[in-house]
Amino acid sequence: MQKDLNLLKFFHQVVISGSFTKAASALRSPKSKISRSISALESEVGVQLFYRTTRKLQLTPAGKTLFEKSAPLFTELEATLENLNDTQNDVSGLIRMSVPEDTGVELLGGICKGFLDLHPRVTFHLDVSNRLVDLIGESFDLALRVGPISGDTLIQRSVGEIHMEAVMSPKLYESFNSPERLEELEKIPYLAFQAEGMEKRIKTVFISKKERRALKLNPLFSSTNFFLLRTLAIQGLGFGILPPYLVREQIKNGELVSVFSEWTTDKDVVHLVLPPQKKIPLRIKKWMDYLTLRLKTEMCGT
């Protein structure tokens, strides 16, 4: 039996939007047409695709399978259509990207500006937050992620490695008699970057060219925001372990000092990740190449 593949367009939009109403708005179609199309698709495939309640719309196992299998095909088809007119000197279209808050605020503005100067027909939408977006479900072209990557189906490109370094205000440094041994950090109030809660003491591993040492640090304050921790470090509340690109200017102008600079935390790999697809659009290829070069220098320091 032949299937009406046009119905898949409505199905994908409902999944991405999360409701019939939002899908209707996105497609500029009546809600009743969206509902009829989903019902027709369910009749054609012979299974229920959504659980429908008054408050929530949720995929059934069959609906989830259909979306996961068909989403990469839709992405590839869209890329093919967009690339029909692509030439080496004609890079255009929207780039939707997810980036962590600290990197997005501190670095991506200038990097995007540089790319737009080269390719003025490109437009950007950046989701600047620490949430882990669903690249397929939310229709993102790519994301920047630091640390281990979950999801074997994602396309991954390593940008480089990044480490954290210990910093504190000059006044705090002097008040603790200019500490000379790494272990002295255990006695200084710690401004901790933590996703959940605050432990009484935090085990942190530092590495040098010759050895590794584990310290039990005493957090006075914890947050999921590096900018807040940087501000408190400048104010002398405690020391922070922060990315180098967030403290480069503050060290240069004397607001912060780098302590035990020969010691850093374990390095994390920085990745660009993309949804599974056979052909990457030209604008994304160009952006990835440009972004990789900029981040290697400005974020990873290589």
Image: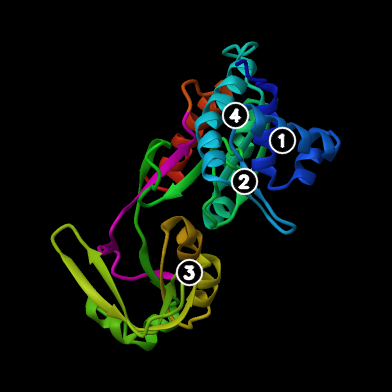
Sequence-wise, which precedes: disc 3 or disc 2? Answer: 2
Query: What segment carries the magenta color?
Result: 254-276
**In contact (CB < 8 Å): disc 3 and disc 1:** no
Residue that carries the numbered disc 1 in the rendered image:
39
Q: CA distance from mark 3 to mark 4?
A: 66 Å
Label 3: how many residues lie within 10 Å, few (<14), some (14-19) or many (20+)?
few
Quadrant housing the N terminus: top right
Could you tell me if residue 136 is visible in this image? no
Give the left or right position of residue 185, taking residue 25 as reference: left
Residue that carries the numbered disc 4 in the rendered image:
45
Which color scheme does this rendered protein use? rainbow
Is 271 above or below relative to 182?
A: above
Amino acid identity at mark 3: Gly
- Secondary-structure class at tag 3: loop
Residue 79, image x, y percentages:
59, 21
Quadrant housing the C terminus: top left
Which mark, by number, is residue 254? 3
Residue that carries the numbered disc 2 in the rendered image:
109
Residue 234, image x, y percentages:
51, 75
Q: CA distance from mark 3 to mark 2?
A: 25 Å
**In contact (CB < 8 Å): disc 4 and disc 2:** no
